[in-house]
Amino acid sequence: ENGGLPTEERRSPRDDDDDDAALDSSFVRSRFPYFATNPDDIFFESGGGSQVPDAVANAVHAALSHRDRSVVGATCLRRARRAVASLLMGRPSSTPRNEKEENDDDDEDDDRLVMMGSNATSLLDLLARKYCESGVLAPGDEIVVASENHLAHVHPWLRAAETSGCQVKWWTLTDTNETHPDENNNSNTNVSTPSSPSESSLLSELVTDRTRIVAVSHASNILGGIRDIASVCSFVHAATNGYGRVVVDGVAAAPHWLSKSVFLDGTTSPDWYVVSLHKMYGPHLGCLLGKRDAAAELSPATSISTSSSSSSSRKDVAATTLEIYKSWELGTVNYEACAGACALEEYFRILSNHVSVGERSHSDWQPTNERTGESSIDDDYRQREAVPPTEGNGEVSSTVDAARTWIRTVEDRLIRRLLGYLRNCAPDVRIIEDVKEMKITPTQHSNVENTRLPIVSFVHARIPSRDIVQHCRKNGIICRSCKFLSTERLWRELSIEDEGVVRFSLAHYNTLDEVDRTIRALESLDDWTML
């Protein structure tokens, strides 16, 4: 060993390049109050809830300290919708041109709506119930659920299937060809026909003209692999003639990996996309982005009178944007959280302004394979997903792109070093990750090749996961071990025998030094290696 660090043979590739990156983490950490009061802690639990920048904390505090509905009220909610649209879809969040635009929440030209809720779990539950109550789901229809989903994106759809008489199909991580009881003992789950099985690692074997919902994750909260959502949406929409809706859980992915191109084309973009802002440096607030036509089909039309001097009749009129919002957001929305959401956009602007001065240009960045150190994205995907921001136009969407690109740069280096070390600890350490069998068609993979979130989950051959976490906590490393609300199916598919996995979930405010300190802590465990 060299000063407590792993020997050169056990370090990840291109570590010298990492050291030369000169990424200024001190500025970023100075924006987060947590690190001022806990300077020695290594916070590797952002997947459970990230730390919050001062801009967000101050905005929430100000809203609570001056509760005036004329100042922090519906206007704040409208601004929060624009901020979320900017953060997730790259839309400009420009200052309203006039008072009418400032107070207009009924923009019928907006093709995607932003619904607010207490969290992603409650929004997904409400979405599934709306599909039942609206009559869109009918007996004989099909719901496809990915086995890697968080339970919040599983249970609502199983209940919806049971209520509406739909068949549930499972898009699995591995092609086991086995039948398992589902999480809720739904009798419809394992019904299948010779031409359409009830579970498969091939999406093309599951989707039919009766498929109405495909519930998937942009990224698993423990596996860290990133799904090619554009290709999934393109396939589902084509295979169902536009009748199938793709519902994407973006909670794990959005803080790290999201491009406005995900939402550019209607045929290749999800019908619904849900996030939790408290996992992307914001307040506790769930946001559900929905296509206007998808939201409209769940909202009853309004019957109005068309009386004239000679006759009287009624006709149905499609629900307005304001009516749709009211059907989702019952009662008073959390205006303090909305103030925090607006400030989150401001944090991205601050970050972008900082990294644009003397920092590495966004054009230098591309994800790398932690094994080889070479570029891991093909040209077609790079053109579609890594669109560089337009300089100098003053739009917030450009600053969001610049900040996100810098975040990817930092996080790519962090996870590459950590993964490089853990891979070299095999067979003592097993990394829990995608096994590349989950495909859209036999020739089309579902994942973005060789890219991942800064999340790594693992188990040890001899040391229980809870003991590793306890040791890490004693060394100032904040992490957790459990199943992280994943499905029992996933654990069977991956043959995980431990009662939980150790998860390190990093973010752009972490540092390479913290990764090295964590490695030293792991190597100080008794029985960590058999060398």
Image (cartoon, grey):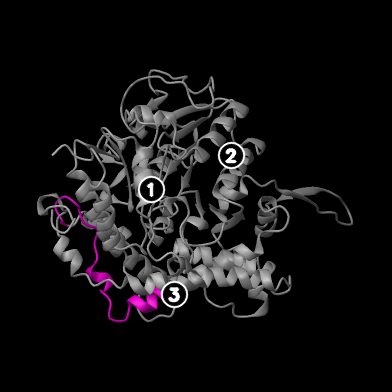
Mark 3: amino acid: Arg
- For the stretch drawn in magenta, the main secondary structure is loop
Q: Is residue 130 above or below residue 169?
A: below
201 within the magenta span: no
Q: Secondary structure at mark 2?
A: helix
Give the mark nearest the N terminus, 3 or 1: 1
Residues rendered magenta in the picture: 351-374
Residue at the extreme left: 9
Q: Which residue is mark 3?
A: 349
Camera-nearest residue between 318 and 399: 399
Location of the C terminus (image quadrant): top left
Q: What is the crowding at mark 1: few (fewer than 14 residues within 10 Å), some, or many (at least 20)?
A: many
Mark 1: amino acid: Ile
Q: Is residue 74 left or right of residue 147?
A: right
Q: Which residue is mark 2?
A: 128
Indicate the position of residue 194 as horizontal and vertical percent values.
Answer: 38, 18
Q: Is residue 112 left or right of residue 259?
A: right
Indicate the position of residue 29 as horizontal and vertical percent values.
Answer: 39, 69
Indicate the position of residue 86 as horizontal and vertical percent values.
Answer: 48, 66
Q: Secondary structure at mark 1?
A: helix
Q: Which numbered circle lies on residue 53?
A: none
Q: Between marks 3 and 1, how big is the CA–CA gap? A: 27 Å
Q: Residue at x 36, y 34 (%)?
A: 203
Q: Which residue is mark 1?
A: 229
